[in-house]
Amino acid sequence: MNKEGILLLNKPAGYTSRDIVNIISKELNTKKVGHTGTLDKDATGVLVLLLGKYTKLTEYLTADDKKYIATFKFGFETNTLDLSGEVVHKSNVRKTPNEIKKTIQSFEGKYMQEVPMYSAVHLDGKRLYKYALKKEDIEVPKRLVDIKKIEIIDVKETEAKASFLVSKGTYIRSLVRDIGRKLNTYATLTDLIRTKQGNFDIKDTYTLEDIKKQDYQILTVKDIFDQSHFVEVDNIKYKEIINGVEQKEKINKEIICYTYNNSVIALYKKKLDVYKMYIKLI
């Protein structure tokens, strides 16, 4: 079975993204496994795994937008902003479904979001959750995030469910917290499913059971880049490419996929006005 490429997994609840990497590494008998976006332990859905030389594409694929279906309850907030934490705030304030819908929709667009204390974000060389565990008083970082599209699925006085298409770096736990506070109450995430990352959809993912039964397919470069990224080369340029010679191209793409006899031989990445070897695939 091929061990170079992209494997789309439907992550089950109860596993960290690191747990999944370790499991896949063992199942496929390869040490080179990475992922392109952490999912919380209790979250499920699309986890994009990179195998072998494709781990170098992590940064490129992490930049994609992500889509989630989130369910959240009103009236309380935990220190982790989900059900894994301890309740730290409560409120008896109740809003009508219409008020809740309007408030949720009001978050469509860009805003400065405070990241969760219980997260792996670094501050002064240390992850935030380590400050949280020691109950250290720090100024929590904020990020500009883009909530690109919101679709309300269901709303009650005590609970809501919605789909969110968001930019890289957006924390749905924080978004839920901010929705609750804007409603003059509290809210906590109770269920989260990542349904899409970039062009990768949950309908195309595999389960851990599929992996163990070897019932899966690994995607290659041709599955993730459109034709505008590909350049077929002749014998002379083939030798240049496999020897890592810098290239100049008229097409303006961050990544170029060079092919020889219709087989991908290397990926080059743009740096200033030239393209340099990024991943050699032969």
Image (cartoon, grey):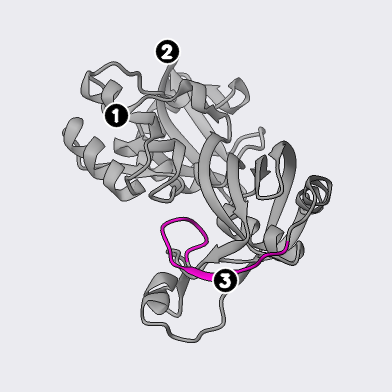
Tell me what residue is drawn at x 41 percent, y 24 percent: 220
Q: Which residue is mark 2?
A: 261
Quadrant assignment for the C terminus: top left
**Among numbered discs 3 and 2, the one appearing first in the sequence:** 3
**Among numbered discs 3 and 1, the one appearing first in the sequence:** 3
Rendered location of residue 66, percent (x, y): 59, 41
Quadrant assignment for the N terminus: top left
Tell me what residue is drawn at x 37 percent, y 75 percent: 130
Q: Which residue is mark 3?
A: 89
Is residue 148 one of those drawn in magenta?
no
Whether 141 is drawn above or below 221: the answer is: below
Magenta extent = 80-93
Distance CA(mark 2)–CA(mark 1): 36 Å
45 sits left or right of 101 in the view: left
Q: Which residue is mark 1?
A: 208
State the predominant SS element of the stretch in magenta. loop
Mark 3 vs mark 1, foreground winner is: 3
Distance CA(mark 3)–CA(mark 2): 63 Å
Rendered location of residue 255, percent (x, y): 54, 38
185 sits left or right of 52 in the view: right
Whether 17 is drawn above or below 122: the answer is: above
Tell me what residue is drawn at x 37 percent, y 76 percent: 133
**Among numbered discs 2 and 1, the one appearing first in the sequence:** 1
